[in-house]
Image (cartoon, grey):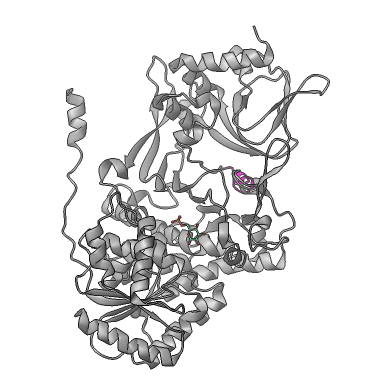
Amino acid sequence: MPESESQVLASYGIEAQTANPPSQPCVMVIFGASGDLTKRLLVPALYNLACDGLLADNFAMLGYARSEMTNEAFRAQMTEDIKKFHTRQEFDQEVWNNLVSRFYYMSGGYDQANFQKLKAEVANLSSQHNTSGNILFYFAVAPRFFGPICDNLHQAGFREGSGWKRIIVEKPFGTDLESALKLNEEVLAHWNENQIYRVDHYLGKETVQNLLAFRFSNGIFEPLWNKNYIDNIQFNVSEEVDVGSRGGYYDSSGVLRDMMQNHMFQMLAYLCMEQPGSFEPDAIRNEKAKLLQAVRVYTPDEVARYVVRGQYGPRADEAGKVTKPGYRQEKDVPAESKTETYAAARFQIDNWRWEGTPIYLRSGKALWKRGTEIVVEFKKPPQAMFNGTAVPQLHPNRLIFHIQPYQGIEMQFQAKVPGPTLQLQPVNMRFSYADAFKASRYTGYEVMIYSCSHGDATLFSRGDLVEAAWRAAQPLLDYWTATPAENFPNYERGSWGPKEASDLIERDGRRWFEVVTDGLLKRVALFQDGDMLFLSQVIQALRPKMVGADETIIRKGEIGREMYLLARGEVEVLDDSGKVVKVLKDGDFFGEVALLMSTPRMANVRTRTSCDLFVLDKTDFNRILHDHPQFAQSVMKIAKDRYSVK
Ligand code: BG6
């Protein structure tokens, strides 16, 4: 092995092997056990814990729901479901048999008589499995049951006796500020805050937990973590999935309640909060609460200026036939629904650290890609020193947290392109979880159940935190109720979202940073056979641009400074008389001839529909051509066919 390679490998540490103790003994009672969450996530999480030796031997799970079922039938159902929903490469029958033999079921409603029976059953399981009276209640039911269950548990005497009693509450915790306050009141009527564990499954994600490790265990970033060095921060949760069979729930929710007020605000708090004094749960949660309390509560005018919403419309084929429904055609969604499936917002944190630093959030369903990323964009150095060189402009340094599906952290900076003159190219340093650690097969719920059993509330939301998040979200809900959207649907399924979202950030002289993977780039025919080096150079150079319908992008006779890749939409190429000579669609490109041949633009190009475009600037184009002459050939070949260029 050459020396340079051996040195690089030597810088990797050996993964620390710390033996984690198993969860604490307990009986786990799942309310709503016949629902989706239990089979899809909770039972697979228990199974993962068991496989990894992290589930106490003294453990039993009691499923509780209205449907009638025997213990045996419940076990048989779970055994069938786990085959579908387990997340490991191999299924370990022995571990499963051992686990499922500790599953029990009880049917009943949410009234006192049934809870007396429940009390007797739990006491029975507790002595049978020697769980020291510890009970973990999991509320996998609709929020309207949270209060009544808490009351009934209290009245049935569950608070008394030895052992701890803890309650995990699923989201959504309220549908607005008022309902969240009421829910907190109901839940806390008989139980203490330190017994209530409000789930936000984003906090169970390794990559989200790592935000804290990254910020506070590395000395080089914290000094830069403020308004003096950071220009803006972008949180992006882009989902390719639509609302599927959840239209009924989703229509009363929308993306603000479903993603932003909870998952995204949690990430925001982790990324932007002050340093906690320790890793104690309340030390961290105090700082998160302070941060969320500092998010500016917008006036209606500010909502109108800083927030945009969207709803996806259908996707049609070339003949205009709808191939996939829009939101309003989804099951259980009203035909005139005004519910937003997309939102983009600029928030402001009014504290010493962040005053004046825009915090952008955007999320939506039925978009072009799945990807959750946080982009921290640093301030640019002064350009003046580079005047007179071949560097047209400097790019900002960016730190990108890839939360999912790709998991890693990337630092973008500029490097000198090898050669006799000073030219720069953005490059990256990348840490990938898959390269550094054994891949985690967890669903995210393992750590929730495990931490709760140990009384560690770090990963759960506290009452005041939830309220602070609702306080910041409430003006958006109010404004949207007062001024229902007139332009829905306003983005096509499979697109980048509504054009208003890119206008929002462009008004500030910035743009959304799009994480483009080689897989996404390969959707464009031109790049299908590209090797990694080539693709990564292209990815670094691309600039996303959204353009509305009927806009001229290229004018005949002008000097070309960029070429365009059409990710989605249609453009038409027009001759001198304004006649359409060609229509270009998803995956096509245009504007290349003027760059290849240094001639003025040969035709006008106008958008027919709204378009999602990638722009490749002339300097980047030339550099890539220089390193990859075969790229020039493929572009030239297509250009020749298209324009009869000799
Ligand atoms: C859930 C939302 O809380 O989070 C869903 O209700 C959303 O609508 C999901 O799809 C996203 O979670 P993840 O882990 O897939 O990013």
Quadrant of the rendering where the N terminus is positioned: top left
The residue lying at 50 percent from left, 26 percent from top is 527
Q: Is residue 229 above or below residue 426?
A: below
On whether residue 345 falls in the magenta region, the answer is no
In this orientation, does residue 171 appear?
A: yes
User: Quick check: 377 left or right of 87?
Assistant: right
Residue 339 image offset from top left, x and y in percent: 65, 61
Instruction: Classify residue 569 as left or right of residue 115.
Output: right
Q: What residue is at 23 percent from the left and 69 percent from the top?
A: 23
Lateral position of residue 391 relative to residue 498, left or right? left
Asked if residue 445 shows in the view, the reply is: no
Bounds of the magenta span?
502-509
**Image spot of residue 573 (x, y percent):** 73, 24
Q: Residue 261: where, in percent of width, then height?
A: 51, 64
Rendered residue at 62%/48% (across/down): 501
Using the rendered view, name the quadrant where residue 44 is placed. bottom left
Toward the viewer: 252 or 373? Answer: 252
> Quick one: 445 or 468, which is closer to the camera?
445
Quarter in which the C terminus is drawn: top right
Q: Could you say which is closer to the camera, residue 130 or residue 567?
A: 130
Query: Picture coordinates of residue 109 (x, y %)?
Result: 46, 84
Quadrant for residue 254, please give it. Answer: bottom right
